[in-house]
Image (cartoon, rainbow, N blue to C red):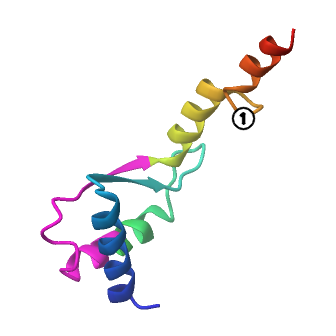
Amino acid sequence: MNIYNIAHDLRSHCFAENVAGIVIALPGTLKNVNPEGAKVKSFVDRLCNTGKLEGLGLKYTYLEERFASKGYLDLYGEGGDEDEDEDEDEDE
């Protein structure tokens, strides 16, 4: 699939779902080295340069994956689902 098709699909989805913004995860490591981050940013630049996303008012930001993963663990813990504890309380 070429970049124009990807941009077209993204535009269609964002329009259909009334998306206002996108958070783009940047791969990282514990040593704060981000060798793949440049590839991700280059891909996003290429998407934007197609012109297919213009007029949507779409905003985007980057977030390092390691922070997203930590936030997930802080919120949900190692087990995953936040609702699991609530289900256990109802059974008692």
Q: Closest to the observer: 92 or 62?
A: 92
Q: Which residue is depicted at the point 59% across and 49% down?
A: 29
Relative image position of residue 60 (x, y in whole percent): 28, 55
Relative image position of residue 64 (x, y in whole percent): 46, 47
Q: In the displayed structure, does residue 46 sit left or right of residue 90?
A: left
Span of residues in magenta: 44-63
Furthest-bottom residue in view? 2
Q: Eyeballing the image, is 38 above or below 29?
A: below
Q: Which residue is depicted at the point 52% across and 52% down?
A: 33
Q: Which residue is depicted at the point 28% across and 57% down?
A: 18
Furthest-top residue in view? 92
Q: Eyeballing the image, is 7 above or below 41?
A: below
Q: In the displayed structure, does residue 86 sit left or right of residue 22?
A: right
Furthest-left residue in view? 55
Relative image position of residue 55 (x, y in whole percent): 12, 68
Q: Closest to the observer: 34 or 83?
A: 83
Q: Closest to the observer: 21 or 84?
A: 84
Q: In the displayed structure, does residue 5 sit left or right of residue 85?
A: left
Q: How many marks?
A: 1
Residue 89, located in which quarter of the rendered image?
top right
Q: Is residue 23 magenta?
A: no
Residue under pointer 1: 80
Q: Which residue is depicted at the point 49% across and 56% down?
A: 34
* Quadrant including the C terminus: top right
Furthest-front residue in view? 91
Residue 37, located in which quarter of the rendered image?
bottom left
Relative image position of residue 86 (x, y in whole percent): 72, 18
Badge 1 marks a residue whose secondary structure is: loop
Instruction: Determine crowd level at label 1: few under 14, some 14-19, many 20+ residues with C-alpha closer than 10 A.
Output: few
Q: Eyeballing the image, is 74 above or below 48?
A: above
Q: Three-letter amino acid code at disc 1?
A: Gly
